[in-house]
Image (cartoon, coloured by chain):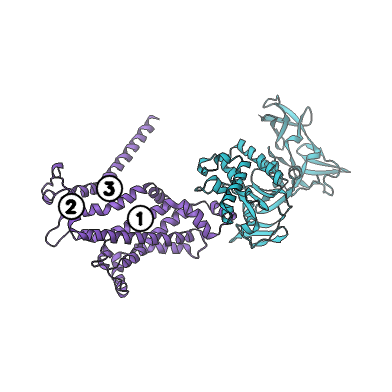
Chain colours: A cyan, B purple
Amino acid sequence: MAQVELANITKSYGPVTVCHDVTLSIAAGEFVTLLGSSGCGKTTTLNMIAGLDDPTSGEIRMGGRRVNELSPVQRDVAMVFQNYALYPHMTVGENIGFTLRLRGMKKTAIRARTEVVAASLELSHVIDRLPAQLSGGQQQRVAIGRALVREPRVFLFDEPFSNLDASLRMRMRAEVKELHQRLGVTSIFVTHDQEEAMSISDRIAVMHRGRVEQVGTPEEIYASPATRYVATFIGSPQIDLFGAVIEREGNEICCCAGSARIPLPPGAVPDIAQGTAVEVGIRAEHVMLSDNGIPARVRLVQPVGPSTHVTLDWECGTLVARLNGFARIETGTQTHFTLDADHLLLFDREQGHRISTH
Amino acid sequence: MRRASIGARLADAGVLVGLIVFAVWSIAPMVWLVLSSLLPQLSLIAQPPQIGLTNWTLSNYLAVFGSAAALGQGIINSFVVASFTTAVALGLGAPAAYALARLSVPKSGAVVLLILATQMLPAIAVAIPLFVIISRLGLIDTRLSLIIVYLSFNLPIVIWILRGFFLGIPLGLERAAAVDGAGLIRTFWLIVLPISVPPLCAAAVFAFIESWNEFFFALILTRQNAQTVPLVISAFAGQYQTVFGQMMAAAVISIAPVIVLAILFRNHIVRGFADGMLKG
């Protein structure tokens, strides 16, 4: 396993720049996910780490050594591709052992090592089959096996579960996480699925328009998003945003939206000027229905099993409240809600960066 | 609903009729060829031709095998020329097509168009210069001269077919091979070629049939020793009499290998052409 560092990586295709000044440091043995919507530059970044694409500028280091000029093999990375990229004319065993064959290893040694890897991924019974004869999950495991057999310094995963159905995806997620815990190899994972990123990663780098917006643990990314984009990209249901104005009265700072006046905890937004226009974000679990508070009307009730999502229409737009269990509440009911001021996220209305301190 | 289903049925019927017409159109000359080869000259030239089963005979075939040693030599010549042309066209065409599909070749679009443009030259336009060049090289009436000439017009088609297929191979496969440690040549040899069997077969059969059937350049560039099958067959049309039955029998014998080839590889050929031509 090796430390991976990206220093000011930029990648341009002609006039189009797809990665802007990406800087990221991944500790040895860490599991980091590059998360973002399609076209944000995450796969390009991964390809540059793999050695499949060259950065236009910047430096990639592995184990403290510059690797820009090295091939994927010299970098000693293994990669799992989005569409598995299994060689269709080779059996499972040949697919897994191909990299060893290229290294000139003896056939018996290749077979032995391939069998161990296949067994660890429960592929022993299909080792002589062609990829086309396997299920999606098995194909995925062959792709992982092909990476495992190398015992590489770094694992790279390019949206490996995007072609699997929901239940299989959950299972493969758990398998990859267990694999990482067992082997401890530095892993870089690319996905657009925020839930996948949250559940699998030690840290997440959220990318947007070719830039890294925020790097942090799943908890940091979720609870303290650095920008409005990160706040809206992470979390399901999506965070609700509404416009508000800051009012100061002595030591008390309030956030005013329509007729609602929400006092902020001390120190939440130090040095903010009276009358500053902000954007307020609040997650569904911090919206509480109550007998008094801000008036609202229930627009939609969506039970999802462990909780119920209740969409509320209020003076400044809509909000979703997450209630525990199956909530007994009717659509169209007039109600009230309160917001947990400790979890309000305030963003600069123009730039979009967070201005509240928690 | 009912209307749509009637419309759909009509459309199906239309397609079926069209396919039948096309099949008859394609197969009828073959049927006539085989039939003619089985009829004696008199039955064949009678008005109308007497094609009844009672008239059928193998005499044409016996005569062709008995008298025309030239046909045997012609078949050998055709086989050698077509095989070498095919092998070299694939050997050169496959790497060239891969390079044009995947490497950053400067002006590759123009190169591909130029390759195709060579097909637009009428044969007659290059016949005289080619004759002069081949005779200066001392290659008149040699198989080598035919191989060289046939290569020049088969190679572009082979490149065109294969390039189209290579473009359609998912880039991920080659990237996976790169991560596994394969360089360009090993990726081509161990990954790309093995999964390209259908277009390789299609291109091979195409080049083989083109070379096997070619008449014009064979007529110009050969005399006696290197005569190919089409020339031998044409020799049955004499100055005073054309022995139609024997000519047809010789033609049937000469197309047999090509038909066997096409039947053996038909699945690959259909897939190969579909993949290669559509994605060009």
Which one is in front in this view, the residue at disc 3 or the one at disc 2? 2
In three-dimensional space, the C-alpha distance between marks 2 and 1, rounded to whole angstroms, equals 31 Å
Mark 3 nearby-residue class (10 Å; few <14, some 14–19, many ≥20): few
* Residue B217, picture quadrant: bottom left
Mark 2 nearby-residue class (10 Å; few <14, some 14–19, many ≥20): few
Do marks 3 and 2 share a chain? yes
Q: Mark on residue B62? A: 2
Residue type highlighted by circle 2: Leu
Quarter holding the C terminus of chain A?
top right
The residue carrying mark 1 is: B206
Identified at 67% across, 40% down, the residue is: A195
The residue carrying mark 3 is: B26
For this orientation, the residue located farthest to the bottom is: B136
Please indicate, yes or no, whether residue A85 appears anywhere in the rendered image.
no
Question: What chain letter is assigned to the residue under label 3?
Answer: B
Q: Earlier in the sequence, mark 3 or mark 2?
A: 3
